[in-house]
């Protein structure tokens, strides 16, 4: 257990640093190339993300699970074979897709509401091969529970993108083409992460072997996850393509449509993923443990891990909900100098809870071999997403995107929780905890609104945000402790064990 918490701490520190730097870089981009430039860049990145998802999104977690399964079955000789099969499978898809895209050239312009995005897309496209192979090597690190190299590489990738991006954009004569510089920075970062991961892979004495016998296991297990994530990515890509066009049809100008899309998808939505990003470190370490307990049929440990994951996710995301609801407008102005972004943050704050729960429960179920079911749930949410962005922009404008995301994450969360109860031999007890933890956000929001109303005129936007954030977090924490949703004794005990436990003598 002590090793588990250390691994979580290591991954969390690097992840927080990486995401914080990425957050600062996004602020720089918003100010350097504007909301319209961010929208152009975001559209190209979304289409690229769809292709990456189609190629390799299911492979890392599948590879990690199969490595864990083979070792649990004392069948270690298959590990090298399945790693090689995953690399070959990824390359056999990535290389032809890149070739086809370049051969089609301008014929792909129908995918982009703004043709400037097509130029950015072609700059990023070579990175598809590098980052796809890197994703497989990342799965190897997960399967080996070797989290430190992965964490360092991810951080260095982010640093590389930031340095190259700022350098290129700064020296560009035409800032309107800043999105092109941002795209070039993405490619450079992918080449770096691929290179470093390859070196570490062989330095850790991982091996390659004849992959022939493992193609079927890796493909059959990864295809449902890839399909599920492809549906998600397709939904995002369709949003990037269709939503600006539907906004144009609703009467907005091209500039207004791209600006609104940039404020929502390029500025507000990434901020909503902050809690999910923090949870990612916990998930990364916990999922191999859940997979191992599932295949070894350790029911009590499995139940404990599932409960731990869901409760941790719930309480963490609910710390953020009141802050974003109360101070969303302040955050938008402080970070992006955008009141539109702030209004969107306030309206969508509740969504963070479902984003976190959907993410963690999907990861748990996939580690237990439920890839097909989670795919079907994802498709169901995607149908409602598509309907929202097609029919609602004329009535509610850019907020059609919020309605669509709500359908996706609420549907998958509810269905995932129901499936988890069926899959676990000992049923996890989480419903009461979820309801109680979510319920105490309501009085916290009310306290925050009162504080924000009283303080804004005296302290200004920035200091009101700081004070209200502290007030809401402290108030929520007190309620959580008061209703025994967080145990002070457990926190104290884990802290002592983590920092002060002496190593046992051999």
Image: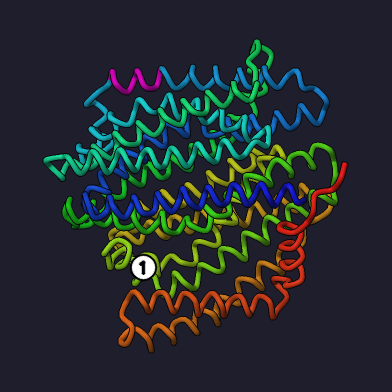
Give the quarter of the image for residue 233.
top left
In the depicted view, which residue is nearer to us: 251 or 265?
265
Whether residue 388 is visible, yes or no, is yes
- In the rendered structure, the answer to whether residue 216 lies left or right of residue 396 reads right
Q: Residue furthest right?
A: 506
Q: Which residue is mark 1?
A: 331
Give the quarter of the image for residue 191.
top left
Q: Position of residue 70 (x, y in %)?
A: 76, 26
Chief secondary structure of the magenta span? helix
Q: Position of residue 33 (x, y in %)?
A: 21, 49
In the depicted view, which residue is nearer to us: 331 or 236?
331
Residue under the point 16% across and 54% down: 253
In the depicted view, which residue is nearer to us: 149 or 246?
149
- In the rendered structure, the answer to whether residue 4 lies left or right of residue 167 reads right
Determine crowd level at label 1: few under 14, some 14-19, many 20+ residues with C-alpha closer than 10 A.
Answer: many
Q: Residue furthest left?
A: 173
- In the rendered structure, the answer to whether residue 379 lies left or right of residue 103 reads right
The magenta stretch spans residue 394: no
Q: Bounds of the magenta span? A: 96-103
Q: Secondary structure at mark 1?
A: helix
Q: Is residue 203 above or below residue 325?
A: above
């Amino acid at each position: 257990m002590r090793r588990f918490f250390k691994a979580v701490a290591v991954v969390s520190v690097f992840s927080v640093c990486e995401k914080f730097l990425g957050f600062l870089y996004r602020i720089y981009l918003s100010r350097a190339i504007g909301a319209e430039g961010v929208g152009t860049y975001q559209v190209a990145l979304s289409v690229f993300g769809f292709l990456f998802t189609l190629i390799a999104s299911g492979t890392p977690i599948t590879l990690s699970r199969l490595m864990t399964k083979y070792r649990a079955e004392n069948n270690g000789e298959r590990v090298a074979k399945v790693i090689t099969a995953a690399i070959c499978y990824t390359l056999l898809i990535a290389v032809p897709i890149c070739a086809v895209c370049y051969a089609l050239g301008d014929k792909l312009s129908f995918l982009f509401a703004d043709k400037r995005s097509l130029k950015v897309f072609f700059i990023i496209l070579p990175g598809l091969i590098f980052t796809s192979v890197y994703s497989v090597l990342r799965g190897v690190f997960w399967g080996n529970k070797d989290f430190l190299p992965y964490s360092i590489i991810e951080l260095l990738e982010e640093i590389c993108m930031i340095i190259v991006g700022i350098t290129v954009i700064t020296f560009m004569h035409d800032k309107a083409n800043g999105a092109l510089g941002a795209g070039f920075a993405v490619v450079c970062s992918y080449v770096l992460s691929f290179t470093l991961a390859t070196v570490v892979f062989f330095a850790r004495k991982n091996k390659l072997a004849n992959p022939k016998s493992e193609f079927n296991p890796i493909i059959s297990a990864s295809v449902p996850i890839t399909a599920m994530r492809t549906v998600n990515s397709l939904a995002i890509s369709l949003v990037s393509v269709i939503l600006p066009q539907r906004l144009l049809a609703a009467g907005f100008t091209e500039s207004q449509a791209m600006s609104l899309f940039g404020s929502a998808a390029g500025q507000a939505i990434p901020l909503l993923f902050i809690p999910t990003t923090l949870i990612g470190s916990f998930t990364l370490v916990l999922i191999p443990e859940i997979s191992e307990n599932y295949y070894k049929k350790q029911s009590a440990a499995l139940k404990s891990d599932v409960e731990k994951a869901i409760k941790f996710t719930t309480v963490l995301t609910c710390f953020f909900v009141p802050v974003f609801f109360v101070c969303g407008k302040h955050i938008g102005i402080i970070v992006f100098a955008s009141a539109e972004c702030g209004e969107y943050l306030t309206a969508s704050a509740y969504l963070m809870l479902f984003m976190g729960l959907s993410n963690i429960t999907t990861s748990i179920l996939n580690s237990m071999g439920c890839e097909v079911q989670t795919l079907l749930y994802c498709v169901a949410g995607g149908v409602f997403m598509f309907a929202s962005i097609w029919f609602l922009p004329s009535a509610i404008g850019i907020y059609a995107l919020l309605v669509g995301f709500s359908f996706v994450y609420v549907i998958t969360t509810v269905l995932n929780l129901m499936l988890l109860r069926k899959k676990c031999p000992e049923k996890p007890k989480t419903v009461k905890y979820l309801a109680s933890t979510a319920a105490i956000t309501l009085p916290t929001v009310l306290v925050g609104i009162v504080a924000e109303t009283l303080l804004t005129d005296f302290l200004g936007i920035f200091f009101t945000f700081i004070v209200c954030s502290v007030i809401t977090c402290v108030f929520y924490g007190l309620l959580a402790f008061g209703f025994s949703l967080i145990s002070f004794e457990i926190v104290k005990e884990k802290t002592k064990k983590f920092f002060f436990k002496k190593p046992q003598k051999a």
